[in-house]
């Protein structure tokens, strides 16, 4: 019987997660984590080092190469009060993340502001010293209040520095709030995948934290190929579902950035197994399909309007085949002389979703009552509860710095 995702009650996707089971720090060896291997209903306990041997032959792995930026800034008011500014996403006139990170001299961002009531009209200033001994300063000016954030204008000296330079110099790493601790210097390396390239995320695609050059070498020996995509993970990934039914939940939007070459690689791999590393890679892949559906239905869709609304998959009648949708997307990009796809996705994947491109998932263990748990349930059905009960009963470590799982819903 088909499931109506809008009627789902989030309280049906909860479990008891003791504080002691949340991994507050990573293991010294990224590959030393455990791997829960689920295939077609059976559960086995493995180690992450065994992943290359467990993947379906000829599988294509899809990695999210976003890079976490040090997006938390702490300023002091003349009174001594601390104002925290958490940079979420760039604002007009430059909203493209890649371009925004390369801005020099000044920029405007949408930000969360801690202790906002204490920030009056004055400009906040932060002085810093660069590695070469050069001194500089960053100034923040509070702009318009938005629904749950503020626009903040940043200006800095020396003006030739990029905003990426500024954040890496004076910013702090935004660890997930459930870790309930301050970031350390070690987190700058451990809360980053070894293949991170595109700066712009405020949370790591944590399923990828287990991969090392040695794992990649083992994958190559087994002829397991890979392809990079980019989804800049936003703070919305930690947004709790407060609505009793999913119909009232407003799914956060995130920016995806995928080359036409990567889309072609995925297209040419069909119908062989495609395994995303992490929920963000999965969300990106499935969003590519639905963007293909949109440009099939509206060939003249303007490039700035490339968006996947959250309920599109559940409202589309007779969607095209995966190959046809990806081919349409490539034709669209070529028509608009675009070598890369830039789009926004609000796609929500919940029970009732019909997967188009993926055959399984590599992922960590997620928070109760989260949209990520809905995604896992969409993939393996009610067995998600068996998987999580097994993990809890067998001392698996949970959440961002925790253990991993390979979820294959059927024999592939």
Image (cartoon, helix red, strand yellow):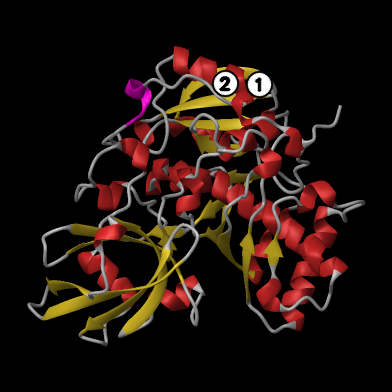
Front-most of residues 48 and 250: 250
Residue at 44% in and 32% down: 48
Q: Residue 165's x, y, as percent?
A: 27, 73
Of the pair 271 and 395, the residue shown nearer to us: 395
* Label 1, residues with CA under 10 Å away: few <14, some 14-19, many ≥20: some
- Label 2: state its secondary structure: helix
Identify the residue shown where x is 32% and y is 75%: 163
Tell me the CA gap for discs 1 and 2.
6 Å
In the image, taking residue 106 as reference, residue 216 lies left or right, namely right
Quarter of the rendering containing residue 195: bottom left
Q: Quadrant of the C terminus?
A: top right
In the rendered image, the vertical position of residue 81 relative to residue 335, given as above or below: above
Q: Residue 378's image quarter?
A: top right
Residue displayed at 49% across by 33% down: 366
The picture places residue 267, in percent across and down from the top left corner, at: 74, 59
| Picture layout, residue 296 above or below residue 53 | below
Residue range in magenta is: 19-23
Is the stretch drawn in magenta largely helix, strand or loop? Answer: helix
Q: Residue 9 location in percent, x, y? A: 67, 30
Q: Which image quadrant: the N terminus?
A: top right
| Label drawn at residue 383 | 1
- Asked if residue 399 is among those painted magenta in the image, a careful observer would answer no
| Image coordinates for residue 152, horizontal then vertical, percent | 36, 72
Residue 387, numbered label: 2
Label 1 close to label 2 by CB (< 8 Å): yes
> Left of 25 or right of it: where is 4?
right
Rendered view: 156 above or below 49: below
260 or 320, which lies in front? 320
Which residue: 31% across, 59% down? 116
Q: What SS does tag 1 mark?
A: helix
53 left or right, relative to 198: right
């Amino acid at each position: 019987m088909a499931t109506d995702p809008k009627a789902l009650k989030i309280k049906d996707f909860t479990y008891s997660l003791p504080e002691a089971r949340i991994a507050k720090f990573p293991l010294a060896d990224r590959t030393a984590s455990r791997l829960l291997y689920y295939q077609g209903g059976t559960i086995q306990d493995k180690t992450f080092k065994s992943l290359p041997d467990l993947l379906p032959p000829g599988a294509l792995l899809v990695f999210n190469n976003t890079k976490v930026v040090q997006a938390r800034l702490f300023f002091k008011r003349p009174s001594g009060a601390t104002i925290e500014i958490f940079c979420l996403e760039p604002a007009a006139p430059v909203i493209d993340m890649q371009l925004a990170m390369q801005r020099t001299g000044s920029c405007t961002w949408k930000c969360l502001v801690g202790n906002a009531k204490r920030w009056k009209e004055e400009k906040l200033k932060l002085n810093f010293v660069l590695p070469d001994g050069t001194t500089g300063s960053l100034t923040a000016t509070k702009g318009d209040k938005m629904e749950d954030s503020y626009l903040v204008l940043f200006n800095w000296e020396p003006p030739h520095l990029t905003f990426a330079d500024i954040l890496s110099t004076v910013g702090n790493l935004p660890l997930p709030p459930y870790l309930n601790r301050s970031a350390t210097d070690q987190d700058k390396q451990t809360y980053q995948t070894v293949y991170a390239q595109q700066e712009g995320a405020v949370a790591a695609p944590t399923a990828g934290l287990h991969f090392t050059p040695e794992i990649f070498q083992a994958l190559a020996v087994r002829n397991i190929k890979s392809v990079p995509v980019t989804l800049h993970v936003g703070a919305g990934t930690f947004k709790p579902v407060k609505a009793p039914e999913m119909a009232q939940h407003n799914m956060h939007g995130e920016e995806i950035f995928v080359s036409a070459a990567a889309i072609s690689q995925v297209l040419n791999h069909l119908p062989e197994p495609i395994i995303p590393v992490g929920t963000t890679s999965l969300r990106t892949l499935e969003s590519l399909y639905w963007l293909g559906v949109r440009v099939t239905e509206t060939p003249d869709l303007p490039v700035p309007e490339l968006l996947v609304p959250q309920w599109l998959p559940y409202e589309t009648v007779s969607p095209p085949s995966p190959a046809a949708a990806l081919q349409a997307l490539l034709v669209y990009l070529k028509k608009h002389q675009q070598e890369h796809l830039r789009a926004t996705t609000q796609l929500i994947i919940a029970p009732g979703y019909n997967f188009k491109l993926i055959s399984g998932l590599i992922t960590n263990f997620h928070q109760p009552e989260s949209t990520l748990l809905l995604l896992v349930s969409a993939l393996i059905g009610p067995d998600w509860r068996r998987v999580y009960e097994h993990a809890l009963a067998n001392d698996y470590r949970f959440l961002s710095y925790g253990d991993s799982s390979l979820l294959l819903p059927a024999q592939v």
